[in-house]
Structure formats: C-alpha cells, structure tokens
Amino acid sequence: MHSKKVTKIGVLTSGGDSPGMNACIRAVVRTGLYHKLEVFGIVRGYSGMIDDDIQSMNSRSVANIIQRGGTILKTARSKEFLTHEGRRKAYDNLKKRGIDGLVIIGGDGSFRGAQVFSNEFDIPCIGVPGTIDKDIAGSDFTIGFDTAVNTAVQAIDKIRDTADAHDRLFIIEVMGRDAGYIALHSGISTGAEHILIPERRTDIEALLRSLQEKEKRQKLVNLVVVAEGDDFGGGNEVSRIIKERLPNVDIRVAILGHIQRGGSPTCLDRVLASRMGYSAVEALIEGRHNVMVGIVNNRMHYTPLDKAVKATQKISEEWMKIVKILAS
Ligand code: F6P
C-alpha cells in the first residue's frame, strides 16, 4: 500500500487499442470526479506523457463515448519510454501538474513500462487489461476480447455460407500474434475443423491427413481458423502448404485483420470496462500501487504488475480435445 493520498490522477491508453477502452476512460474520469480528484487524460499513451500532451478532463469530456470503439485518448507504442531519459521527461510533466497516480489501460507491454516507471519515480500505477488478445494472467477477461471475438464469429459465419455453397475449404486468419484466444473461441463457436494457435506446435501432417480423410467422406464445409502468429506464419502460409500437398482441394483464404479491433463494444466489454475503470480509481484511493485490476470468477481481483506481465493465461489440452471431438 502507498501512504500518500492521491489528489490528481492521469489516465492513458497504450499499445493496441481495444473496443471498450472508451467505456473504461469514462469510468475512470467519472469515478475520480466523484471522489473529488482532478483527472487528466494523457494523449497517445506514454508518448503523450513524454511530449506533455496532457489534458484536464471533466464529466462532459467523456460524454457519448461509452458506445464507441477506438480510444478518444489515442494510443501508441512508445520507444522513447523504454529509455530512462524518456521516463524522466514523462515524470517531470506529471510532476509539474501534481499528478500523483496513474491508470494505464493496455496490455502486457504497457504494464511492463508502468512497472519500471513507478519503481523509478514512486508514482502509484494501476493497470487495467485492455487488449483484444486476452493473454494476461490475473483476469478471466480483458477489455475488447468479447467484441473482437464476436466480430470474428460474425465474419466466419458469413464465410461458412459461401464455403458451403461451393464445397470449399476456407482458411480464415484471425488476430493474435502471440496469443490464440481469438482463434480458439471464434473457431469453436463457428464449428471450425481445425484451429491453429501460437501456443501449440502445428502438426501439419496430421492436418493434411484429416483434410484428406474428410474429403473422402465428402464432408462438405471445412473451416480452418488460424491465428496470425501460428508457427507456420498465418493463413497464406498454411494455404500454400495445403495447396502444394493437396493440389485438388478448392481452397480460399480470408484474412480478417483489423476489423476485429474496431467497432462498438459489446455489453460484456462495456460492463467489464466500467467495473475495471471504477475499481482502478478505488484502488488508487485505497493506496494500492503497481497492481493490475482483473476480474476472476466475477469478482474484482488485484495482481501485482510484475506477476501480470510474467505469466500468461494457459490454453489447456482439454480445449484442443473439444475442438477435435466436435469437428468430427
Ligand atoms: O495486441 C493486439 C493485436 O491486435 C494483436 O492481436 C495483433 O497481432 C497486433 O495487435 C497487431 O498490431 P498492429 O496493429 O500494431 O499491427
């Protein structure tokens, strides 16, 4: 716990944006104001902290944003914040305004930065997991995952219609450079035959055997969902290998890309973002520092930032078993 009482807090969004970040900013600002704190919005994440792009926020600054994707505070991945000089500039800009607490909405890279910063400059930092990837330990959900995965599901359902019409094999690439949750959840909920994720080695021979076997028994629709960071390097690569080995298969690739990061957040993401934003400010007021706010078993949960950045959620063997059994 931190002994000093916070009076002025800053909020920023950092790393890849995710739908629901705006709802979280709104919750931070309004909870802060409720507790008579001054609240500042830091523009473009840590870059704005270094460049002194910091604005005072009031209740109206966050009106009409709960339903909007993206982030009104903008976001960035700052290289300069990785250096001590960069962090020193950032600290000076906070200090001249008297900002004595920070809420950082972002992913593990953002929390790593917060951890180093607050160890150097004694500013309590509270992390809020905002990433479509859902790859952070210490929370069952991250802000934006539900929206992103539902966007993917809607798109894959549409692809299934045309796949069915042509009896085609479709390789669908979803986001996730280091994490397979979007692939896993969207794949299971659209009945994909195979799901390839960065956390598991892809057994390409087994995949080819299974496609051949399905072709023999004339299984008509075949969807393979591939995370962009699978060990073959995404949808186009997987398709190239299949074409090479099974030249008669009619195959198409669809890369869903950044549409998964945009759009109006789902109810689940808005509620999650509101609860987490509220709890982040409460945590600062209670004197907590360097923790990430999470939701575990539907209750608020605080994980030390250093633990949250080290561990990731694990994908168990059972998930893969479900995929295999249900796709037969
Ligand atoms: O971390 C979120 C994420 O959308 C990943 O799923 C994806 O690999 C990455 O960001 C893409 O980043 P960028 O928008 O910088 O290309």
Image (cartoon, helix red, strand yellow):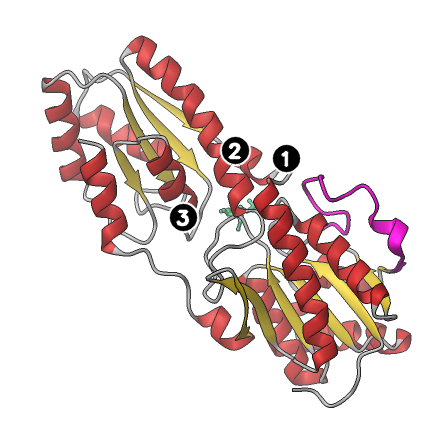
Name which of mark 3 and mark 1 comes first in the sequence: 3
Residue 128's place in the image compared with 69, above or below, is: below
Q: Could you say where residue 80 lies in the image, as x and y percent from the top left?
A: 68, 66
Q: Quadrant of residue 255?
A: top left
Name which of mark 2 and mark 3 comes first in the sequence: 2
How would you classify the magenta stretch by its main secondary structure? Answer: loop
Q: Which mark is residue 65?
A: none
Q: Label 3 amino acid?
A: Tyr
In the image, the residue with mark 2 has its CB under 8 Å from the nearest atom of ligand 1: no
Q: Label 2 amino acid?
A: Thr
- Residue topped by disc 1: 263
- Residue topped by disc 3: 181
Residue 237 falls within the magenta-colored stretch: no
Frontmost residue, 61 versus 99:
61
- Residue topped by disc 2: 151
Q: Residue at x 30, y 42 (%)?
A: 196
Q: Could you say where residue 288 lies in the image, as x and y percent from the top left?
A: 66, 80
Residue 58 falls within the magenta-colored stretch: yes
Q: Residue at x 55, y 64 (%)?
A: 294
Q: What secondary structure is found at the residue carrying circle 1?
A: loop
Frontmost residue, 133 versus 59:
59
Q: What stretch of residues is rendered in magenta? A: 56-75
Local packing at callout 1 (Cα closer than 10 Å; few below 14, some 14-19, many 20+) is some
Q: Residue at x 47, y 26 (%)?
A: 155
Local packing at callout 3 (Cα closer than 10 Å; few below 14, some 14-19, many 20+) is many
